[in-house]
């Protein structure tokens, strides 16, 4: 989640868990690299999935979030799965210890609502 980097007031435990996953990924990339195992992190932003049902049903809140996304839309599950498929392929054999943000630019453009 982008909340490994982006504070999310009143969701401290969530943000801490995401930050912990990021550091675990970095450590495992170093530890397992000599075995040829790559470890990376995918950090989605606002994706149109059931977890965002309330947001999707509230046009005012949805519009406020979309205003923060430079690409002007929520992500689709395929935006995330396509990246994961690439990282799992041999085309990504030399990529390890990296975080990939799938957020339409949200992380670097976010403004508190």
Image (cartoon, grey):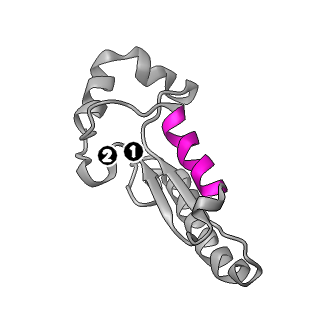
Quadrant housing residue 46: top left
Q: How far apart are marks 2 and 1 (CA)?
A: 5 Å
Q: For numbered disc 2, what is the local secondary structure?
A: helix
Query: Counting other residues with Cα less than 10 Å from the Cα at mark 1, is it few (<14), some (14-19), or many (20 or more)?
Result: many
**Quarter containing the C terminus:** top left
CB atoms of marks 2 and 1 within 8 Å:
yes
Q: Is residue 2 left or right of residue 25?
A: left
Expressed as whole percent of the image width and height from the top left, the position of residue 68 reads: 25, 39
- In the rendered image, which residue does mark 2 sit on? 106
What's drawn in magenta, residue-wise? Answer: 78-88
Expressed as whole percent of the image width and height from the top left, the position of residue 6 reads: 38, 56
In magenta segment, residue 59: no
- In the rendered image, which residue does mark 1 sit on? 103
Q: For numbered disc 1, what is the local secondary structure?
A: loop
Q: In this view, does 26 lie to the left or right of 10?
A: right
Quadrant housing residue 36: bottom right
């Amino acid at each position: 989640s982008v909340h490994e980097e982006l504070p999310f007031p009143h969701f401290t435990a969530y943000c801490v868990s995401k930050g912990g996953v990021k550091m675990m990924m970095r450590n495992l990339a170093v530890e397992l690299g000599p075995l040829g195992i790559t470890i990376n992190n995918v950090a989605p932003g606002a994706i149109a999935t059931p977890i965002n049902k309330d947001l999707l049903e509230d046009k005012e809140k949805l519009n406020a979030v979309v205003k923060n996304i430079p690409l002007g839309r929520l992500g689709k599950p395929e935006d995330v799965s396509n990246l994961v498929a690439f990282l799992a392929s041999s085309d990504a054999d030399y990529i390890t210890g990296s975080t990939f943000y799938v957020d339409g630019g949200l992380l670097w453009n976010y403004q508190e609502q």
